[in-house]
Image (tube, rainbow, N blue to C red):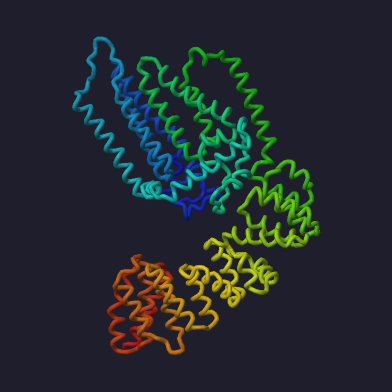
Amino acid sequence: MALIGLTQAAFGVEAIYGLYQPLQVDPTITPALLTTFVNANHQAGLFLLGIFSAGALAVHMRLQGRTTTDAVLVGRLRERRLAALGALAIQGAALLLSLSRAAIVALAVVAPVALMLAWRNGPVPAGRSKSRDPQGRLWLQRAALAAGLGLLALVVARQGAWAELSTLWRVNEAETKFRIASDAVALIDLSPVLGVGRGAFLDLFPAVDSRPLGVVHTHLESAPAAMLIEWGPLGGGLVALGLLWWWIAAVYSTGSGRHVSARRVALCGPLALAIHNLADFNLEFLGVAAPLCALAGALSERRGFFRAPARPAILVGGLSLAGAAALALWAQPYTWQNRTTGDAAVLAGDMSPEAAQRMRPLDASLHILLAQRALEIEDWAQARARATVASELQPANSDAWLRRAHAARELGDAAESASSLARTLATMRHPPDLDLTRYLLGRYPNAEELAPLMPKELAPWTVVMESLIAEAPAYAAILAAARSQVDGREPPVLHMQVRLALALDNPSLALHYARLLRVLAPHEVHSHLLLARALESQRVPRERELQGDLEEALAQGLITEPAQIALLEEKLLGSYLRDGQPDALARARDLLPRLLARPGDRAALQRRHALERALAQAGR
């Protein structure tokens, strides 16, 4: 798998085997290594097993070579050991290129333990010296091996692995993972003994999500937490304790022969995978779970409780697998990947709404679909019932609240309709479509009536305002003024008021708001650019004042991002050209080399070269 991924990366192949293009991943955006797995984070789990298995084989070959006197066999074992080390290096490089932070951390934690186990001396036959190699040479080989692997890791890390790993130290990145897991613990109360059931997390988590971001969480990205929530503290806890007991028993029941160190190195693979799954769910996938089961079976102690006759074990195992396969085939049409097919069947009339609800009673999207159908046939009570269920299951779903508001209004419940519409706007993450915008304008023709229902949080308020600015700027200006009366020190509101004033051809008001914005947000590039636009829009453009403001911003280093500095320099150079005076053109010629040296995309470079040509024309 690693070789396929590295080959595809070498040839720039953006589809698995050159044939299958993953729908969930855009290889042009994601720098992670594309192998036969769709998700690079999950493939890293299999690499963890492979890395320590290859290391175990290398240890086994080394110890076997130390206990044999056949020179030919010693040479073959040395070749096989080198092949195992090569497999370890290839998989290690592929793991780092997968950019899985949890897997890289797991490798860094477990690898030192595996190295200590690998370098322990095994048994030596009677009559032979403890080592045919001098101790200094042995340590030199180990140092060279460690240096080589370290150099390989450094080279690969420079391709993006270290940058990805450094995001662990960002507060928001770490908080999101732990916050989702801590929020999900509340689901245990719904079924404190047996758990909520496999697959129910998708539907139940939105109701307890404290900070919804519009991301659909199909699985909880923590295998131990998922065990407790889906199987309950009783079932999940017993499974987790059983797995821990198995690993400890496997480590301490390996005997005292020459295979001890190699077996324990191999057992480091399941340990690393367990650490990885503290922040991942790759055991949900057969490509990781099946090799783990095979490796666990190979490393399990055969005595006592684990011992079973071969034929009955094969019979029981075969029947269990057949039953599991039949269950999987039966359940496949009802899994979360096929929900859109079920929705299409309901819309086409191939499935009754009652049957759909029996199969997916907690699916908020299904209830929204049924609420929409009820609205279309003017069954207002049914529409409100279905929309209410959807809004309880997904409190951050604006579609559910909108349909609830519409149904309540038709039923004459003005208070519920207004509160539901307010929740609709408060849960907006993208600008509403044109139909919703016109619905708001038609239902509240007076902006003062809509103002109390506008979101209190700034992010959804800004999203709603963006759609209103495009459709009714004067209406949006009233809403912006109403918010600024409550708190006139919000830069995004002032930013919007400058834009609105410019759109409504009120340059004096735009200049007033732009000056306030620059005072409140001097380190934001848009503060300076909007002030420059406001000065340009005056009846008599104030070019000298504009130049002074931009020169001051650049001299004081208020903006530090090179691309943003270039925007200010472009605006300043344009003002020099419009000024046309000899001193202004001289300053433009001094500024141009710095501007041309700034990084920028194709559009930015085209703008700068256009300014260069205009300056050359003005100097003639």
Q: Residue at x 29, y 25 (%)?
A: 119
**Is residue 254 toward the left or the right of residue 581 in the image?**
right
Check the picture and name the quadrant holding the C terminus. Answer: bottom left
- Between 415 and 474, the one lying in front of the other is 415
Check the image and report above or below for 450 versus 378.
Answer: below
Among the 4 quarters of the image, the one containing residue 184: top right
Q: Residue at x 56, y 72 (%)?
A: 482
- Between 547 and 101, the one lying in front of the other is 547
- Between 461 and 530, the one lying in front of the other is 461
Where residue 197 sits: x, y (%)?
Answer: 63, 35
Q: Residue at x 47, y 43 (%)?
A: 178
Where residue 24 sits: x, y (%)?
Answer: 55, 50
- Between 512 and 583, the one lying in front of the other is 512
**Is residue 454 toward the left or the right of residue 179 in the image?**
right
Among the 4 quarters of the image, the one containing residue 371: bottom right
Among the 4 quarters of the image, the one containing residue 195: top right
